[in-house]
Amino acid sequence: MAHLAGRAGRAGRAGRAGRAGRAGRAGRAGRAGRGDFVVDDIGLADALLTTREGVLPFWDGSADLSLNTTTAPSEFKKLKSLSPTPREFVLDERLFSRFQPAGAQVFLTELTQTAGAATPLMSMTSPDGAFFERQLMHMRSYADLRSDRMGEIDIQLDDIISFFTSALQLDETRSDWIFETLSAVLRLCGYIEFPLKFHFNVARPSQLSTRVMPIIETPTHGSWPSGHATEAFAIATVLTGLLYRQTDDAALFSMHAVSNSDEKLGNLLLRIAMRIADNRVVAGVHYPHDGMAGSLLGISLGEALVNYLSGASGTYSYQMAAPATSENPELTQGSLAALLTSGTRTEVDFVQAPAARDELLKAVWGAAVGEMTTKA
């Protein structure tokens, strides 16, 4: 089963925001019906031409099929009829229009205003340059793990979903809408994280010391917050929501509550996300604190999605403060628990009642929940 999860998890490659250029391939979506066979396009076109000429009687141009126009199809039914790339763009429009990065903050249009002003879902304050210089000292011990983690680091350049789906024994043939949801979450993370990185513009470790010597290519965008950590923790949060929020519930879904419970799967998913974040430090392309910032950002996005789609009355708004001068924190289970406490978050309501929320997104969520329920 794990080998299937590994193959299916590579759908996570769609989450890399820079690959939006795949839109140009939409015209070839018809190939999806051909299975795994590679067919020469010109040869197929010629074969179809001669087949049509050989089997069709005279056609006067009139329609001979009737469409059911009495009942308009639901948005979900229309979405299911689309090939993968157009489907992605429809989902992205619904998600991206709701989440908006702005400077050091992320806003969700569905949140109620506070004192007449928009309430941020996430507010972040980056540490100063001296802090990141001190973080270099902590990176030395991470480098000792490079030979053990190289295989993970290489795969996680393009695929993080497999590491979660393997733990849950999910495969692409029976979990299509779970994978569709996870891929959409990854694309949403890219839409959020890159403007934040651009805003903070934190230098990569190798820009501060020649001794870092990363074992993979250093990305050209800013280091803080970690994109891999953001994506990994968002995936862990949404999967946990699919596991434990399968019916409408007005109460707020909280990863802090899951991490403090005996829910073994929820905690396992958090540990996987933490390892993915750590591997970026091991590789030499991130500071330890990058993963902490990404973890809180990813959880805030994931909780907002789970709460919005599962019928909660609201979600949590977080603040990521810069560490004190004397601190040099790293991402651990203890530091993650501290980030998720009430001191860094506040409850904020959604504007819309559950029945008024986006029907298409709710239908996709419901389909994913159905697959997870069947799996459970």
Image: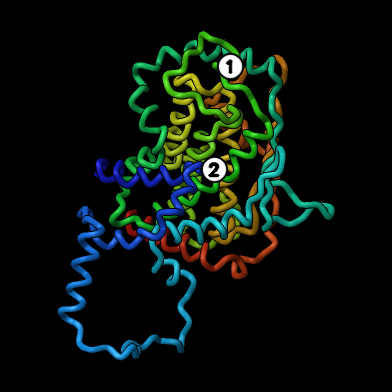
Q: Which residue shows up at 64% across the image and 37% down it?
A: 196
Structural distance between the alpha carbons of marks 1 and 2:
23 Å
Residue extending farthest to the top is: 211
Q: Which residue shows up at 37% across the image and 22% down it?
A: 149
Residue 34 located left or right of residue 290? left
Front: mark 1 or 2: 1
- Residue 142: x %, y % from top left: 46, 16
Foreground: 207 or 156? Answer: 207
Residue under circle 1? 207
- Residue 341: x %, y % from top left: 64, 36
Foreground: 27 or 276? Answer: 27
Q: Which residue shows up at 54% across the image and 16% down it?
A: 206
Residue under circle 2? 190
Earlier sequence position, callout 1 versus callout 2: 2
- Residue 92: x %, y % from top left: 53, 55
Is residue 130 shown to the viewer in this render? Answer: yes
Element at label 1 = helix
Is residue 249 shown to the viewer in this render? Answer: no
Coloration of the structure image: rainbow
Amino acid at dot 1: Gln
